[in-house]
Amino acid sequence: MENLRFQAVEKASEKRPVEVITPTDRPSEYFGKKVFNRAKMYKYLSREVYDKLIDVIDNGAELDRSIADEIAKGMKQWADENGVTHYTHWFQPLTEGTAEKHDSFIEHDGKGGMIEEFSGKLLVQQEPDASSFPSGGIRSTFEARGYSAWDPTSPVFIIDDTLCIPTIFISYTGEALDYKAPLLRALHAVNVAATNVCHYFYPDVKKVISNLGWEQEYFLVDSALYAARPDLRLTGRTLMGHSSAKDQQMDDHYFATIPERVQAFMKDLEIQALELGIPVKTRHNEVAPNQFECAPIFEETNLAVDHNMLLMSLMKKVAHKHGFEVLLHEKPFDGINGSGKHNNWSLSTDTGILLHGPGKTPTDNLRFVVFIVETLMGVYRHNGLLKASIMDAGNAHRLGANEAPPAIISSFLGKTVSDVLDHITESDKDALVIKGKEGVEIDIPEIPNILRDNTDRNRTSPFAFTGNRFEFRAVGSEANCASAQIVLNTAVAEALTDFKTRVDALIAKGEEKFAAILSVVKEDIKTCAPIHFDGNGYSDEWVAEAERRGLDTEKSCPVIFDRYLDDSSVKMFESMKVMNRHELEARNEVKWETYTKKIQIEARVFGDLSMNHIIPVATHYQSQLAKNVQSMVNIFGKDEALKLADRNIALIREIAERTETIEKGVDDLINARKVANKIADARERAVAYHDTVEPKLDKIRYHIDKLELVVSDELWTLPKYRELLFIR
Ligand code: ADP
Ligand code: MG
């Protein structure tokens, strides 16, 4: 029988692009078609209810339960008109994906028939049977069930026949069991703290919005080839596979022409994303073969996070239609670039000021400096925690490799901003501040409005300033952006709060406002200097230098999670009212458990593949070689045959040695797992998996990859890198 690999290669090569029917409307017309957005709220709700709901969305007013029924009715009417029969509370459990349980609208009418119903009660709160979502023990300790509650700030949308309602997921005792609840709290904290600081400069600011523009990287692999790779299917990455003779060394993929089948996929994805109100804008090839990127226009953070979650699930669906599987894993292939999700982040006011962007007046520039410096303060104080927020088993492969951000959080500022900060710290106080009585003149050098300059970009920095925002590049491609955004926004909220306390203290002592601000900024520039690094983040010198600077250089994923429970972290989360110690402990349990499970699954799949694919194929080839040697002996006699067949004999030996090493290695791997599995403590178990199980995979893999090079191509069963990466 022809092996599955060749069938897959044949199938994949024959595929043609799937035709995508372009809507007759323009994108601007079908944008948000499947979203209960403001225009639809206006159409389907009474003026009074509409105003109240907008007040909830824009100003965080309390949701008046009495209007919930009418909102539900309006939503239902819109849903009916779109052929919707079901609804679901859509939430983001700690498993990284999204969860939904669909219910239909039908209810008994009490007269033997059915009616369709959707009440305010069903909209506002649900009790999904959530016992199987990870909770880190919160629910069992409190013997309370979780419930989902409507988040009116993220609009309801339609997928197929289902009305999807974005919700938070919390326990009855109020602890967060998801990403959205703490994210909303963090966004509130940064809004309050930043608004207060804004008042020094602009008294009319009522609200500060956190913006997020993510860039989603991903790989596409043909579905037939994927099906023939159990490791991809079960773990999201290839656990073995020799590198392809050609991969990314020619730099010929990045920004190159998009392959036809992929182009069709992207087109389809974009149409559907736009209909769902996701403002996708950019698409291009990425560095590695079969790697691509998609990015929307930035939005308010909570909405942007929901849109990213939605896009990731949409991508999987659309990919199937086009005969692809989308790989969101951070490192699906060894030796070539992995995938990240750059989080472009900034703060802006309801009055339209971009707080991380320079302005035209000296006041604007001082405000700019304050927000840059206090962001750096937050990042500096919590650099280990920020790293923890983006770390998991998948992203651990990417960080530290020679492509993506290193496992040390630092910030690139570029020459212009660096010079401004230097100027402030170096000049003496008098030169700096006030000239004239109320007319303060702030001697901050000119900051060009357009700071973005491609020559001044540093791809190695995990947290780079890029002109009017910071780009957090260390986020993993599969992650929920909320994890990073919770920590970042909370850390900056804390820094801004602390900043204001100190400035106010100086003002209370009689110091002029801008002088007070400058003197605190000056102090903070010095304090957070260690986080500022414009050099090469991949160099060995940087690791040594970062250690000297006291930055977190820990590399072990389960140990990095400890940062969530540092006193400084707990204090930050509690004082900003984002999470309490108990929630943090529970969430860490989940992180350690997830880490262990991921490595456990990888180790199992690895063992199976080694024993069921690699060794049988290698031994089979070995016997073919042995037969050949035997025939040679029959023909030429022993002495001559041994000479003539010496290459085959060497191969027979190599295969014997490598298969033995692999077998022993797999035994070792199983034993290491057994030992680790006996450890009761979740953290210790994860550490054991990290220290004693995980490293074994790569050691064994080395021999498997070598076998792939010598065993006859015809016998090899797993699709090779060159096939996975170049057939499309
Ligand atoms: P790159 O050159 O890094 O690919 P892009 O111009 O494609 O950058 O933008 C990447 C993302 O950053 C987009 O989602 C974009 O909307 C977003 N972005 C732009 N300006 C801001 C800002 N001030 N705050 C947050 N995100 C922003
Ligand atoms: Mg970018």
Image (cartoon, helix red, strand yellow):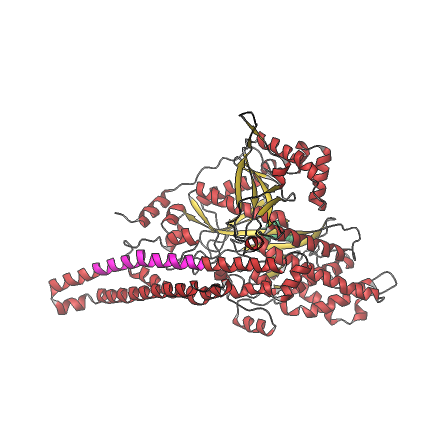
434 versus 153 height, above or below? below
Answer whether residue 551 is visible to the viewer in this image: yes
Question: Residue lying furthest right in this view?
Answer: 437
Residue 576 in the figure: left or right of residue 249: right
Residue 437 is drawn in which quadrant? bottom right
Q: Which residues are magenta?
A: 598-624
Question: Residue lying furthest front in this view?
Answer: 143
Identity of the residue drawn at 77% across and 68% down: 519
Residue 720 is situated, as x and y percent measured from the top left of the image, at: 36, 54
Residue 109 is situated, as x and y percent measured from the top left of the image, at: 57, 27
* SS majority, magenta: helix
Considering depth in this image, is 173 or 618 the residue closer to the camera? 173
Identity of the residue drawn at 22% across and 66% down: 649
Residue 286 is situated, as x and y percent measured from the top left of the image, at: 50, 53
Tell me if residue 371 is in the magenta stretch: no
Considering depth in this image, is 186 or 173 the residue closer to the camera? 173
Answer whether residue 250 is visible to the viewer in this image: no
48 versus 135 height, above or below? above
124 versus 175 height, above or below? above
